[in-house]
Image: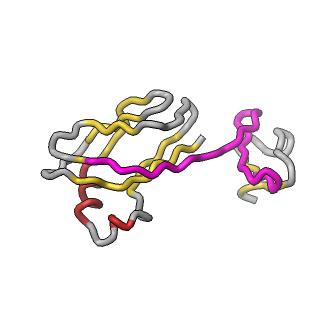
Amino acid sequence: YLIKRGANIPDNTQLLEYELGFSTTTKKLYINDNGDIRELSSIIIKTNITLSSKTTRIIIRNLKLTNDCSVFIDLDFSDTSLNNDNNKIKAFRKADLVYSTHTATSLTLKINGKKPTQSITIPIQITVVY
């Protein structure tokens, strides 16, 4: 199995190192992290960012970040304002936003690519995986 499953929270006798286990009772995913069973969870935040020729950094607030999390940022394709608007998609891709710094509650990104010539608001989705 790629992911083992059972009714209870797995323990390190049931999962090999870095093996995944799903509890059908708690409906949560767990991993054996070097003998410690850790719950894997994620949050999804949908927000807008505004890019312009003057934008150098984007600060995203109201996050819950830890040293053990991963953050993924992409376009929010569920937002209808992206429908048939290639300018927003191209601006986001060309900006090539990259990590700059973070605190426990905010993430700062810098533009590593091209800035748009005009101000453009882009819907994004942030996924934080713990």
Q: Is residue 61 above or below residue 103?
A: below
> Could you tell me what secondary structure mostly forms the magenta stretch?
strand
Q: Nearer the viewer, residue 113 or 88?
A: 88
Residue at position x 84%, y 54% in the image = 6
Give how far across and how far down residue 83 sits, in percent: 33, 70
| Residue with the most extreme top position | 103
The answer to whether residue 35 is left or right of residue 95 is right
User: Residue 38 occupies which quadrant of the picture?
Assistant: top right
Q: What kind of colouring is applied to the model shown? A: secondary structure
Give how far across and how far down residue 36 sits, in percent: 75, 33
User: Residue 31 occupies which quadrant of the picture?
Assistant: top right
Residue at position x 33%, y 65% in the image = 82
Give how far across and how far down residue 89 sits, in percent: 29, 60
Give how far across and how far down residue 41 sits, in percent: 64, 45
Residue at position x 39%, y 39% in the image = 60
The answer to whether residue 5 is left or right of residue 49 is right
The answer to whether residue 35 is left or right of residue 120 is right
| Residue with the most extreme bottom position | 84
Residue at position x 15%, y 44% in the image = 53
Position of the N terminus by quadrant:
bottom right
The answer to whether residue 33 is left or right of residue 84 is right
Position of the C terminus by quadrant:
top right
Residue 45 is covered by the magenta coloring: yes
- Please tell me how many numbered marks the rendered image carries: 0
Q: Which residues lie in the magenta part?
A: 22-50
Residue 53 is covered by the magenta coloring: no
Q: Nearer the viewer, residue 62 or 128?
A: 62
